[in-house]
Image: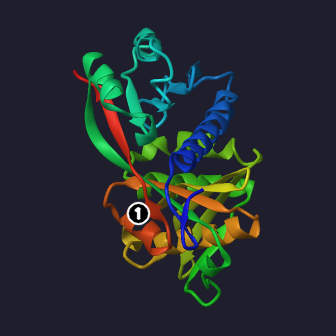
């Protein structure tokens, strides 16, 4: 890892580490979802050299139906990935990390019928004791949840992300299945005795990921989201993590709060098929 003074800076090696840790998180989550009712969700993970094509047939949208890793690791990787998604009647979406891209590879995506449709913020930082934040005297109380509290977690998740309420049951199930899986922890934040926010944390080999976080609309702008980030930073430090990763929509409040807590921005471009 290259440094200026004592500050971690992005290098291709570090960027590869961030991407590989995110892939491990996706594999862990989707392999767990695959166990539900004999894979009722239709989970499949295709590996094409350095690229991973994730699909969940019965959870539409790009959250889990996405390509990560090095999509240019061989001459035919793009064509193989597109065939994989076409066979399953799922639109292909590539989360393209910049360390894998160059003019030739981007032209390959364009020639294959894709275009850059968005950017996505990947954030990172080196964890150190100076990042420990005080949470004891805060009116916001955060606790790690037990298995019986996942209904509450799912309800807050759905409302916080603006999802239809009928999805709460499946969101609950898709997170509860991770309860006893290595590396996963789940948290609920309360304000004045009411549960109003959620967060999750994934840890693998000394690297922590801020896996998800949401706050109910009525409780926003009161520091809850930032408190959940800081709490998970503290938790990661207690588990001897040295690096933290976060993800957010570019220039969003989520990104702003991660930066306030010490994370710095890298970036990804999003490529989708032309309709």
Q: Is residue 182 left or right of residue 95?
A: right
The C terminus is located in which quarter? top left
**Would you identify the image quadrant in which residue 255 lies?**
bottom left
Taking the image as shown, residue 125 lies to the left or right of residue 186, namely: left
Question: Foreground: 107 or 124?
Answer: 107
Q: Is residue 65 or residue 4 the one in the foreground?
A: 4
Total numbered badges shown on the rendered structure: 1
Can I make out residue 152 in this image?
no
Tell me the quarter of the image containing the N terminus: bottom right
The residue depicted at 31 percent of the width and 45 percent of the height is 119
Q: Residue at x 72, y 56 (%)?
A: 206
Q: How is the image coloured?
A: rainbow
219 in relation to 178, above or below: below
Residue at x-position 43% and y-position 69%: 259
Residue at 26 percent of width and 36 percent of height: 117
Residue found at the very far bottom of the displayed protein = 137
Vertically, is 215 above or below 122?
A: below
Question: Which x, y percent locates residue 86?
Answer: 40, 12
The image shows residue 27, relative to residue 149, as above or below, that is above
Query: Where is residue 22 shown, x and y percent of the image?
Result: 57, 43
The kind of secondary structure element at disc 1 is: helix
Q: Quadrant of residue 135?
A: bottom right
Horizontally, residue 8 falls left or right of residue 100, namely right
Q: Image height check: is 153 above or below 17?
A: below
Label 1, residues with CA under 10 Å away: few <14, some 14-19, many ≥20: many
Q: Quadrant of residue 91?
A: top left
- On the image, the x and y values in percent for residue 58 come to 49, 25
Residue 30 can be seen in this image:
yes
Q: Position of residue 141 (x, y in %)?
A: 60, 78
Reading the image, the residue beneath label 1 is 254
Question: Is residue 88 shown left or right of residue 139?
Answer: left
């Amino acid at each position: 890892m290259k440094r200026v003074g004592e500050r971690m800076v992005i290098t291709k090696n570090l960027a590869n580490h961030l991407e590989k840790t995110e892939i491990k998180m996706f594999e862990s989550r989707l392999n767990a979802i695959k166990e539900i009712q004999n894979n009722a969700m239709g989970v499949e993970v295709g590996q094409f050299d350095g690229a991973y094509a994730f699909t969940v047939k019965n959870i539409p949208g790009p959250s889990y139906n996405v390509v990560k890793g090095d999509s240019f690791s061989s001459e035919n990787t793009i064509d193989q990935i597109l065939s994989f998604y076409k066979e399953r009647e799922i639109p292909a979406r590539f989360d393209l990390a910049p360390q894998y891209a160059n003019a030739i590879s981007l032209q390959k995506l364009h020639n294959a019928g894709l275009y850059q449709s968005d950017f996505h913020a990947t954030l990172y930082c080196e964890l150190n004791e100076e990042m420990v934040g005080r949470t004891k005297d805060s009116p916001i109380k955060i606790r790690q949840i037990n298995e019986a509290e996942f209904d509450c977690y799912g309800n807050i998740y759905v409302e916080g992300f603006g999802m239809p309420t009928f999805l709460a049951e499946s969101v609950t199930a898709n997170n509860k299945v991770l309860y006893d899986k290595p590396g996963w922890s789940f948290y609920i934040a309360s304000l004045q005795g009411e549960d109003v926010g959620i967060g999750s944390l994934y840890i693998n080999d000394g690297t922590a990921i801020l896996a998800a976080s949401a706050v109910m609309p009525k409780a926003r702008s009161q520091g809850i989201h930032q408190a959940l980030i800081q709490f998970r930073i503290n938790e990661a430090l207690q588990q001897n993590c040295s690096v933290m990763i976060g993800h957010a929509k570019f220039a969003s409040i989520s990104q702003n709060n991660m930066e306030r807590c010490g994370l710095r921005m890298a970036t990804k471009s999003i490529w989708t098929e032309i309709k």
